[in-house]
Image (cartoon, rainbow, N blue to C red):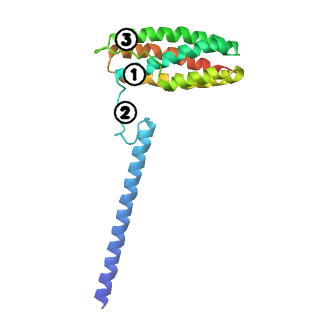
Amino acid sequence: MRLILTAAVAGLAIAAAGCRGSSDNAANASNDMMMNEAMANDMNMPSDMNMAVAPMLASDFVSTVAGSDMYEIESGKLAQTMASNAELKAFGGMLVTDHGKSSADLKTAASEASPPVTPPATMPAGLRAKLDALKAAKGAEFDKLFVEQQKEGHQKALDALKSYASSGDQQSLTAFASKAVPVVQGHLDKLNAMKL
């Protein structure tokens, strides 16, 4: 009887040690996982490296920027006549000039792509609707809506330009995008600095 009891106690001791070892291993594995995630965060890398984003196609890039330029030119013209704030009137004039040049540069870069890409001739429906909303606004309401739309539009354009500049597949268009980034960033900086 004493032998059976001793064997049972020894068995429990071995089982307890085994359990402690496996919980230690689980804790170590959990710590390793947390450390890897922390290292990924420190390096600004996603912890799940399977989240690759496909680069924008040249045709999509050209359509995005051409549409943005058309909208900026037309909204800039509206600001020159409808804004109640002198700073916004001047900003509207700058948009007409800078985005007119951007449109011409984009056409050249798109024609040099292989195969060449033809920019769209009409503004996308979503941007046309924003323009219609601007036309319906008056005075301070126009100023507020104009600035909101400009901030959103310039941020989207900036994101597209930076993305294509770093991962685009057409050299003429990546060069265009790189050159356009500081211009669009400058517009966004002016908008953010305005005190209306």
Q: Report crowding for label 3: few under 14, some 14 to 19, many 20 or more residues within 10 A (C-alpha).
A: many
* Residue at position x 69%, y 24% in the image: 141
What residue sits right under mark 1 in the picture?
61
Residue for point 52% across, 23% down: 127
The answer to whether residue 192 shows anywhere in this view is no
Q: Is residue 46 among the parts visible in the rendering?
A: yes
In this view, 158 is above or below 104 = below
Residue at which label 2 appears: 53
Q: Secondary structure at mark 3?
A: helix
The quarter in which the C terminus is drawn is top right
Under mark 2, the amino acid is Val
Where is residue 124 shown, x and y percent of the image? 47, 23
Q: Position of residue 179 (x, y in %)?
A: 44, 13
Give the mark, 3 or 2, whose residue is nearer the N terminus: 2
**Residue contact at pointers 1 and 2, CB within 8 angstroms:** no
Secondary structure type for disc 1: helix
Q: What amino acid is labelled 3 in the image?
A: Ala
Q: Determine the residue positioned at 40% across, 18% down.
A: 62
Judging by the rendered image, the residue that carries numbered circle 3 is 109
Asked where in the image residue 107 lies, by quadrant, the reply is top left
- When the figure is inspected, residue 128 is found, relative to residue 96, above or below; the finding is below
Which residue is depicted at the point 45% across and 39% down?
A: 41
Q: Distance between the Cα atoms at labels 1 and 2?
A: 15 Å
Numbered disc in front, either 1 or 2: 1
Residue 116 in picture, x, y percent from top left: 31, 14
